[in-house]
Amino acid sequence: MDISSEYLAHEILDVVPIIMRTIRREMRSHRGPDLSVPQYRAMNFIRNHPGASLSGVADHVGLTLPSTSKLVDGLVGRGLVIRQESELDRRRVDLKLTQQGDSILVAAYQHTQACLARMLTGLSPGDREEVIAAMGVLRPVFSPVTEEAAPGEEHE
């Protein structure tokens, strides 16, 4: 069967949002009640872009620089993020997760992975192999344009 790239794109556009909704729901459900979605997204971006700038976080989260600065101030105050002077440019401040901040994201990732594993237990061994093969084919196609990652890989 010859499947067109247009049909394949249609299928990806139909299925990936459903998967991402589940991933987001599970990750956010385990982020803790005292961590807002923008804070969680900022931490996730910082974890996967070591030395991220405030403007990079603002672009990712979709907030203004002053709002992002306030958001990051809260994370710094809670001991989840540290600001450090850039080694390359003293005028720039780099952001980095603390061990506590990283632990929060790793716990959310592990919770989500366990949830997905439970959901996938009904797949036959052959279906599991097909999914793994498909992921192997798709990863290099989309990796160059990927912008964010979560602990261990590309989720949020």
Image (cartoon, grey):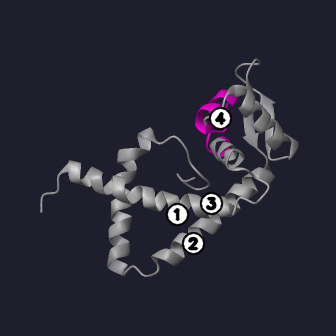
> Is residue 126 shown left or right of residue 37?
left
Near mark 1 (Cα within 10 A), the count class, few <14, some 14-19 or many ≥20, is some
Q: Residue at x 44, y 61 (%)?
A: 18
Q: Quadrant of the N terminus?
A: bottom left
User: Is the Cβ of the residue at disc 2 closer than 8 Å to that at disc 1?
Assistant: yes
Q: Which residue is mark 2?
A: 115
Residue occupying image coordinates x 65% and y 35%: 57
Label 4 and label 3: CA atoms lie apart by 19 Å
In three-dimensional space, the C-alpha distance between marks 2 and 3, rounded to whole angstroms, equals 10 Å
Q: What residue is pinned by disc 4?
A: 57
Residue bounds of the magenta highlight: 46-61
Q: Is residue 29 above or below residue 82?
A: below
Q: Earlier in the sequence, mark 3 or mark 1?
A: 1
- Residue that numbered label 1 is attached to: 22
User: Which of labels 2 and 1 is toward the front?
Assistant: 1
Q: Residues within 10 Å of mark 3 (few under 14, many from 20)?
A: many
Q: Position of residue 141 (x, y in %)?
A: 35, 46
- Residue 4 percent across, percent down from the top left: 17, 52
Amino acid type at mark 2: Cys
Residue 49 numbered mark, or none: none
Pick whichever of labels 2 and 1 is earlier in the sequence. Answer: 1
As measured in the structure, the alpha-carbon distance from the residue carrying label 1 to the one carrying label 4 is 24 Å
Q: What amino acid is labelled 4 in the image?
A: Val
**Helix, strand or loop under label 4:** helix
Q: CA distance from mark 2 to mark 4?
A: 28 Å
- Real-space Cα distance between discs 3 and 1? 9 Å
- The secondary structure that most of the magenta stretch takes on is helix
Location of mark 3 (residue): 27
Q: Which amino acid is tagged 1?
A: Thr
